[in-house]
Amino acid sequence: MEKKATLTVNGKTYDIPLLIGTEGEMALDISTLRQKTGLITLDPGYANTGSCTSSITFMDGEKGILRYRGYPVEQLAEYSSFRETAYLLINGELPSAKELERFSLMLNDHSLVHEDMRSFFENFPRRAHPMGILSSMVNALRAFYPEIPERSEEEEINITFARLLSKVRTMAAVSYKISRGHKVVYPRHDLSYCANFLKMMFDSPVKPYHVHDDIVDALNVFWILHADHEQNCSTAAVRLVGSARVNLYAAISAGICALWGPLHGGANQAVVEMLQDIQDSGGDPAPFIARARDKNDPFRLMGFGHRVYKTYDPRARIMEKVCNRVLKKLKIHDPLLDIAKRLEEMAVNDPYFIDHHLYPNVDFYSGIVLRAMGIPLNMFPVMFAIGRLPGWISQWKESMEDPKWKLHRPRQIYTGLQKRDYIPVDQRG
């Protein structure tokens, strides 16, 4: 028997179908509400609105659960690689040994960036933000790769997936090198996905970069934890732009732009800047916590709270362990980590933060890990974007294959002036 809810408006009752997901999530299907009643729903920020059904990522914000294609993120972070996790998200299943080898070869084959793109990079102003450069370059990338008629559509799409996953990593490293005025380092076929990125970022003729296994492992975990996160701001942007049936490059470019903001992809950068401010003020987090509690002070503690999680972000627990392990192995003492731990201890025991469900999120420790790797502050959002790329691709792919696809077109409630007549300019007071 179909489950349903009822809505009564002006004495009339309407049936509303009740949808139940595989994990017991429930939703009111209002897709025909306006057609039946003439009404729409109003939900600023879409906090209570589901824009799609999806089989990619499951989140439970109250219980602190995150799974990709059914696999707990804790298991993937411990046992998987970013390359394998990307395959899982895009294709729905973990790859066999042969499938993973074939996928790895595709990533290697498509890792180089067309030399003609160098002039694009070199003509950006030196102070241009890496996220703006990356978004522009991804959009431009489409012009270099028109579809080849001899290929099947499926083959072409799979090549595009591999091309984006591999080239975005290369473009990020190239943009960093050019911004420093340094010689561009090309990818190597004998290095893993993460090791290649680090080599392209930091190797130089005068100071060869030696890939450190612990740094590679930390980068793998960082990117796995950021690989997808349900219908967040940037993913929703990819789906919305993609619903107009634009090419994947344009949709990914839109996702990068959405991720650029300080409340999304720039949050880990904001955390480090906040910790630096605390250190510069003497190192005591207490005054900053007091400011965060003050309703009249616009200040907020970065790295605490989440739109969905109402308990500890499961990714934050993993990132904290990675942070401690990397700093210990590399024998790095980062005073910002000491401040972060004091801040966390004070905040999680503060009634205000408990009542408002303000627990540490993944950004709280990830910035310190990126610092330990040597990643410059303005590249933090780019690191997030590389990690989120498999999720964006898988979400775009799912939306393209959805038999119930529709062009995204939200409604609104108009609150402006009512109809009025045009007055010629010489008659206006």
Image (spheres, rainbow, N blue to C red):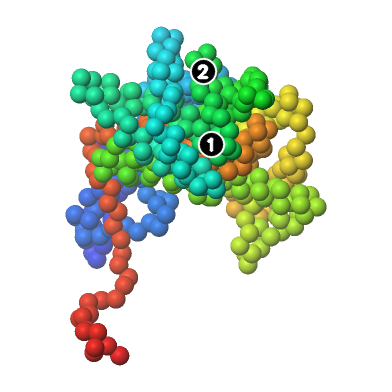
Q: From the viewer's perspective, is 116 left or right of 340?
A: left
Name the residue tied to disc 2. Answer: 188
Q: Residue at x 28, y 47 (%)?
A: 408
Q: Position of residue 249 (x, y in %)?
A: 35, 36
Q: Position of residue 170 (x, y in %)?
A: 48, 29
Q: Residue at x 41, y 34 (%)?
A: 117
The residue type indicated by label 1 comes to Ile
Q: From the viewer's perspective, is 275 left or right of 176?
A: right
Closer to us: 77 or 106: 106
Q: Nearer the viewer, mark 1 or mark 2?
A: 1
Quadrant the N terminus occupies = top left
Residue 419: quarter of image = bottom left
Q: Residue at x 51, y 42 (%)?
A: 130
Mark 2, secondary structure of its residue: loop
Real-space Cα distance between discs 1 and 2? 19 Å
Number of labelled discs? 2
Instruction: Using the rendered image of the protein, determine whether residue 65 is visible from the camera's viewpoint.
Output: no
Tell me the number on the disc at residue 178.
1
User: How crowded is the residue under tag 1: few (<14 C-alpha within 10 Å), some, or many (20+)?
Assistant: some
Q: Position of residue 321 (x, y in %)?
A: 67, 29
